[in-house]
Image (cartoon, coloured by chain):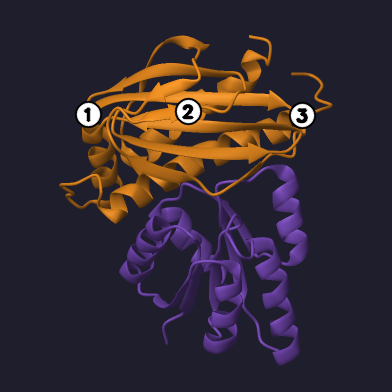
Chain colours: A orange, B purple
């Protein structure tokens, strides 16, 4: 992978850790990161966050509705019956923020990339087509006992990056 | 007398989780702000004992808000402990925060123990 597998690894570790720490869920990764096309079909609840610094990119988590509801329930200790509930969306959005924040903190410490996050956004809708900007991205499919999840990481080099 | 806490974060989830923990352990949440500018205004009005401050927020980020709050504290000769609570916690950011006068820097996610330990250090 031309941008370096090292750039993706903190995101995988962060997804595993944050799902476990916040939602008490084990995430099983199915295979390795593979190149993604320009379009991703939403499973039901999707959150995207972008970052900039010495490299630019985005991080996306795409969850089945049942998984999103279970995450919100486990984090908040409250039952929700709709993914459109504002607290369900706030939970997924903040989890995405924390996952990406933890990952870029690791990258900043190792590679001094000066990465910073923009606020995340979240939307609902099954089979909505999410068009990824024309920068290389890779996805990995994941499974939990509550449903499936796809994680997508995109990076575009914006200048002087060494060591990765 | 209960310690009064102001929460400054753009995430409704963080407000909800922090509020639950703080109330459970006998603290008073005196205000909720959703960005740094609101946080500074509320600080001036409410004069809390402790502020939980996120970094990455719209309108005014947490580091800028900390600078403003520290200025208010100097002007009015009051003391407030600022606990920074952020998803981004690389070395450069934590050093910057400490240099601005942040009392404790915590990385998200957090649990009850982390929050209450931090609060006990402010006393």
Where residue B66 appears, as percent x and y from the top left, is 67, 69
User: A29 or A131: which is nearer to us?
Assistant: A131
Pick whichever of labels 2 and 1 is earlier in the sequence. Answer: 2
Residue corresponding to mark 3: A158
Residue B55 in view here: yes
Residue corresponding to mark 1: A146
Work out how far the residue at label 2 is from the one at label 1, CA to CA, in angstroms.
26 Å
Where residue B57 appears, as percent x and y from the top left, is 57, 58
For disc 2, the neighbor class at 10 Å (few under 14, some 14 to 19, many from 20) is: few
Residue found farthest to the bottom: B76
Query: In the image, is residue A142 above or below residue A121?
Result: above
Query: In the image, is residue A86 above or below residue A122?
Result: below
Question: Same chain for the residues at labels 2 and 1, yes or no?
Answer: yes
Residue corresponding to mark 2: A131
Question: Same chain for the residues at labels 3 and 1, yes or no?
Answer: yes
Q: Residue at x 36, y 19 (%)?
A: A142
Q: Nearer the viewer, mark 3 or mark 1?
A: 3
Work out how far the residue at label 3 is from the one at label 1, CA to CA, in angstroms.
38 Å
> Is B72 left or right of A123, judged from the image as shown?
right
> Is A41 left or right of B117, judged from the image as shown?
left
SS type, badge 2: strand
Quarter of the image containing the C terminus of chain A? top right
Pick whichever of labels 3 and 1 is earlier in the sequence. Answer: 1
User: A50 or A9: which is nearer to us?
Assistant: A50
For disc 3, the neighbor class at 10 Å (few under 14, some 14 to 19, many from 20) is: few
Q: Nearer the viewer, mark 2 or mark 1?
A: 2
SS type, badge 1: loop
SS type, badge 3: loop
Quarter of the image containing the N terminus of chain A? top right
Query: In the image, is residue A129 above or below residue B10?
Result: above
Pick whichever of labels 2 and 3 is earlier in the sequence. Answer: 2
Chain letter of disc 3? A
């Amino acid at each position: 992978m031309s941008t370096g597998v090292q750039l993706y690894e903190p995101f995988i570790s962060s997804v595993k850790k944050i799902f476990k720490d916040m939602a008490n869920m084990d995430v099983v990764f199915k295979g390795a990161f593979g190149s993604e096309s320009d379009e991703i079909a939403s499973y039901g609840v999707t959150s995207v966050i972008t970052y900039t610094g010495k490299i630019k990119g985005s991080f996306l988590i795409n969850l089945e509705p049942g998984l999103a509801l279970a995450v919100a329930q486990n984090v908040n200790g409250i039952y929700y019956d709709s993914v459109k509930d504002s607290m369900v969306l706030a939970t997924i959005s903040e989890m995405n923020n924390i996952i990406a924040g933890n990952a870029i903190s690791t990258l900043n410490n190792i590679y001094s990339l000066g990465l910073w996050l923009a606020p995340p956004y979240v939307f609902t809708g099954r089979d909505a087509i999410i068009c990824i900007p024309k920068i290389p991205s890779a996805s990995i499919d994941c499974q939990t006992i509550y449903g499936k999840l796809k994680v997508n990481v995109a990076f575009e080099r914006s200048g002087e990056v060494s060591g990765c | 007398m209960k310690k009064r806490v102001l929460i400054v974060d753009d995430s409704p989830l963080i407000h909800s989780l922090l509020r639950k923990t703080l109330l459970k352990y006998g603290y008073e949440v005196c205000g909720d702000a959703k960005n740094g500018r609101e946080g500074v205004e509320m600080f001036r009005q409410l004069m809390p004992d402790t502020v939980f401050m996120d970094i990455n927020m719209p309108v005014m980020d947490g580091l800028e808000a900390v600078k403003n709050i520290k200025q208010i504290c100097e002007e009015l000769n009051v003391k407030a402990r600022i606990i920074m609570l952020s998803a981004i916690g690389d070395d450069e950011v934590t050093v910057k925060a400490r240099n601005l006068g942040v009392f404790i820097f915590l990385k998200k996610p957090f649990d009850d123990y982390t929050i209450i330990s931090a609060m006990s250090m402010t006393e």
